[in-house]
Amino acid sequence: MKLLSGIDQIRQLPAWRQRRFERFYHTQYRYRVLPLFADVYLVIAFIGTLLFLGGLALNPDAPDIFGTYLIYTAILTGLIAAHRFTRLRRSAPMIVYLVFFNMAVFSYLGYITTGATLAPIVGLFFFISSVGIITLSLLHTSLIILINLSLLVLCTFLAVDSHEVAETLIGILTNWLILMCLVVAPLSAWFLSQFLRNLLALQFLLRDRNRQLSRTLETLKITEERLAQEQKQQALSHMAKGLLHEIMNPLNCASQAVDFASSVNRDSEVAGALTDASTHQKRIADIVSDLIEFSRPVPEHNLETADLRKLVATATGFCRHQLRGVELHINIPDGTLLPCYPSALTQVFVNLLLNGASAVSNSHGHGKIEITAESTDTAHRIWIRDNGQGIAPEDIKRLADPFYSTSDTPDNLGLGLSICQTIMRHHKGSMWITSEPGQWTEVTLTLPKTAARRGG
């Protein structure tokens, strides 16, 4: 069983996601991992140098090389500062090469002056053994090893007689410590680079799956809200069916009484009043009948073609009392015909006009309601805008919920917009509300231009 299987999982992804991983890996490797490893190594190297200088200072028998190592330490300090505060940090692994050359210069100077003894270059080979860990690159590690071996050969020629060069090099390279450093460097580079690649692959997959999970949770939340809304609408439909049937019984009795009074009446003025009463009773009966049908999953009759201006005019007539003192502007092109359930759509306009009248009555200044419509190739759009007190953003999300209302009026049940939403859904249309608190509210109704298929 593999220690990490991130790369195997990456290979199973689509090509475009594999390219995304390569970009992610390059960014993390070059700009986060390598600078961090270099920071750790530089700190360790600096502490080791200080301890070495301390040992030289406390040892009276130590060779007179303290000043040389002070220069080396000063250069190392400058490299640490440059790596921390300049663009050198983003040029990995340039800092490794600079530290290597700084160490190599002073190590091989000691190697030459001491006649090719091993001691001055032991620290350099220890550094090389850690290059694989710092660079995580087999290429850079191999390159530094080749440079170092070339410098070793060159400095050996300078340190000893030519006939002793081969023997000296063999003695150094077969030393178990030197040999171990040369072997450990590439092995650690290869192993750690594979480990890091797999580790970053798992991190990439985890982040990707977290994003997918977040999107799934958001989708579930939206679905849950929609289901809750549908359940509220369903509850409203069940309640409305019983309530509307109860309304129809006394309404039919009242209509029969008016019809009987009309048949026996001989007074012309009373006849006119009875005719008006009969007309309004019929309108109420039509609205109630349509609402009963809308409480069912699918309306039981087909769409009719109606004139939008006439529907709005009928609605404004019903709201004449509430619209007193309100400036009403209607801008609907003549001959705007749309497939709809006329009584139900009239009810939508009535509810929206009543809401608009209530909003402007509670605001300061002159109340105004504008009704505008336009048609495109596929839809009719109707805007109903008032200059009332507006609606807070947190309230807009709940306006279509049954029994939710922003009004404190006791007789306001909060059912108007919920009914409107249901009616628009049966028309395969939509209702959208926008508002600027304290300034205005606008309701946008969108209806398909052609009759939609019947469905739930």
Image (spheres, grey):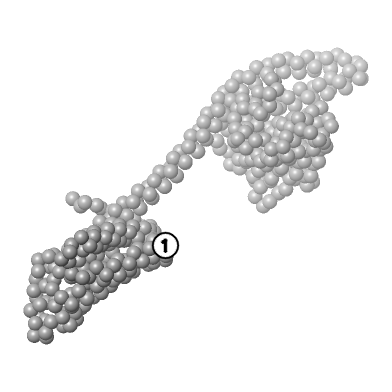
The spot of residue 259 in percent (x, y) is: 80, 17
Write the residue at 81% across / 41% down.
329
Q: Quadrant of residue 141?
A: bottom left
The spot of residue 211 in percent (x, y) is: 42, 47
The spot of residue 370 in percent (x, y) is: 77, 41
Mark 1, residues whose alpha carbon is within 10 Å: few (<14), some, or many (≥20)?
A: few
> Along the horizontal axis of the image, is 287 left or right of 13?
right
Q: Secondary structure at mark 1?
A: helix
Write the residue at 78% across / 30% down.
361
Residue 142 visible in the current orientation: no
Write the residue at 11% across / 85% down.
162
> Along the horizontal axis of the image, is 150 left or right of 302?
left
Residue placed under numbered mark 1 in the picture: 85
Q: Nearer the viewer, residue 64 or 456?
A: 64
> Along the horizontal axis of the image, is 171 left or right of 241?
left
Residue 75 visible in the current orientation: yes
For the C terminus, the image quarter is: top right
Q: Nearer the viewer, residue 16 or 177?
A: 177
Write the residue at 62% across / 27% down.
404
Q: Is residue 141 above or below residue 336?
A: below
Identify which amino acid the numbered label 1 is placed on: Phe
Q: Is residue 70 above or below residue 384?
A: below
Q: Is residue 193 above or below residue 263?
A: below
Q: Nearer the viewer, residue 267 or 137?
A: 137
Q: Is residue 325 above or below residue 99?
A: above
The spot of residue 283 in percent (x, y) is: 75, 26
